Image (tube, rainbow, N blue to C red):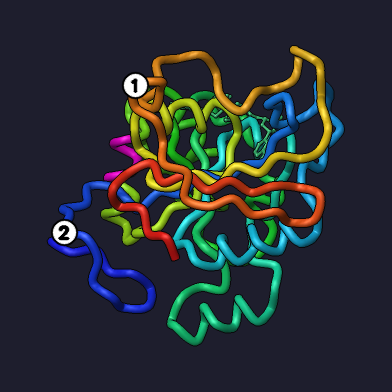
Amino acid sequence: MPYEQSRSGARRIRVVADRPYTLLSCSMSIDGYLAGPNRTRLLLSNDDDFDRVDAVRASCDAILVGAATVRKDNPRLLVRERSRRDERVALGLAPSPTKVTVTRRARLDPGAAFFTAGDSEKLIYCASAAVADARTRLGAMATIVDGGQPIDMQSMGRDLLARGVQRLMVEGGGSLHTQFLLGDLVDELHLVVAPFFVGDTRARRFVNAGHFPWNPDRRATLAEVRQIGDVVLMRYALSDRFRGE
Ligand SMILES: NC(=O)c1ccc[n+]([C@@H]2O[C@H](COP(=O)([O-])OP(=O)(O)OC[C@H]3O[C@@H](n4cnc5c(N)ncnc54)[C@H](OP(=O)(O)O)[C@@H]3O)[C@@H](O)[C@H]2O)c1
C-alpha cells in the first residue's frame, strides 16, 4: 500500500506504512499527572472534551490501553454517541473500534468493562510466558495474541496493521505513552490540560523519564491549540504522516 488514504478518500503523503497511523490521546493536570495518587478516578476533562474524544474514538479502528488502566479505570472504550455508531455501521464498520490491551502477567478481571461492555472485538497482547494462563482465563472473552517476550510496541503495531487496524488510538496510561513516544511510534499527540494541580508524586505522570525523540534540538510541531471550556487541547504533529483534519 504505497499511499495513505484519509477517511475522505483524498490521497496524502507517499509512505510505506509498517504500523497503523497512531494518535496518542490523554488528559493531564497542570503539573503533568494522569491521575490522582489513590484508586479514586480523577476527571481531568469536561463534558465537551469527552465528546471530542468520543468523535476521535469513532474515527479509529482500534483503541489501546495498558492493563493497569483496565484494572484501575475500568474503561468501557466504546463510542458513546449513537449517531457516531450509526455512521460507522453505515460504513460497514463495527459500532465501536476494536479494544486492545497489553499485559505481562495477564491479571485481568473477566468482569471488567473492557470485556463485558459492547460487542467490539477484543485483543489482548500478552507476554509469551503468560499466554497459556491468559488463554485459560480470558480466551473465551478475547483473542489472546502472543506478543513475544518482552512485547515491543513496534511489533505490536505491525501485527495490528496486519489485522486491518489502520488508525490506532492510544489512550494511556503513562507506561504506554512512554513506550510509544520513546519508540517514535506516534503520528499525532492530543494533550489536554485540566485546570488544577495534583501535586502528589505518588500519582502517575504523563510519561516516565527517557530520551524522547523530541527535545530542544528537535522540537515537535504544534499543530493546534483549542480552548474547550476550562481545559485546553494541544495537538502536536509528531511525524510527517500527520493529517491535520
Ligand atoms: N488521564 C488520562 O488520559 C489517562 C488515560 C489512561 C490512564 N490513565 C491513568 O494512568 C494510570 C495507569 O498508567 P500506568 O502507566 O500505571 O499503566 P498502563 O500504561 O495503563 O498499563 C501498564 C501495564 O500494561 C502492561 N504493559 C505495559 N507495557 C507492556 C509491555 N511492553 N509488555 C507487556 N505488558 C505491558 C503491564 O500490565 P500487567 O501489569 O498486567 O503485566 C503494565 O503493568 C492510571 O492511574 C490511570 O487512571 C490516565
Q: Tell me residue 112's x, y (percent).
A: 71, 46
Assess whether mark 1 and mark 2 are in contact (beta carbons under 8 angstroms).
Answer: no
Q: Specify whether tag 1 is near ligand 1 (CB below 8 Å).
A: no
- The residue where tag 1 is placed is 217
* Residue at far bottom of view: 90
Kindly identify the residue that appears in the image at 73 percent across and 56 percent down.
Answer: 228
Crowd rating for badge 1 (residues with CA inside 10 Å; few <14, some 14–19, many 20+): few
* Residue at far right of view: 40
Front position among marks 2 and 1: 1
The answer to whether residue 237 is magenta is no
Residue type beneath disc 1: Asp
Q: Can residue 29 be seen in the rendering of this structure?
A: yes
Instruction: Name the foreground residue: 220 vs 59.
Output: 220
> Which range of residues does the magenta coloring cover?
154-158
Magenta stretch, main secondary structure class = helix
Instruction: Name the foreground residue: 220 vs 57.
Output: 220
Res. 14 mark:
2
Disc 2/disc 1 C-alpha distance (Å)? 26 Å
Residue type beneath disc 2: Arg
Q: Tell me residue 214's x, y (percent).
A: 39, 27
Instruction: Name the foreground residue: 15 vs 101.
Output: 15
Residue 42 shown left or right of residue 84 in the figure: right
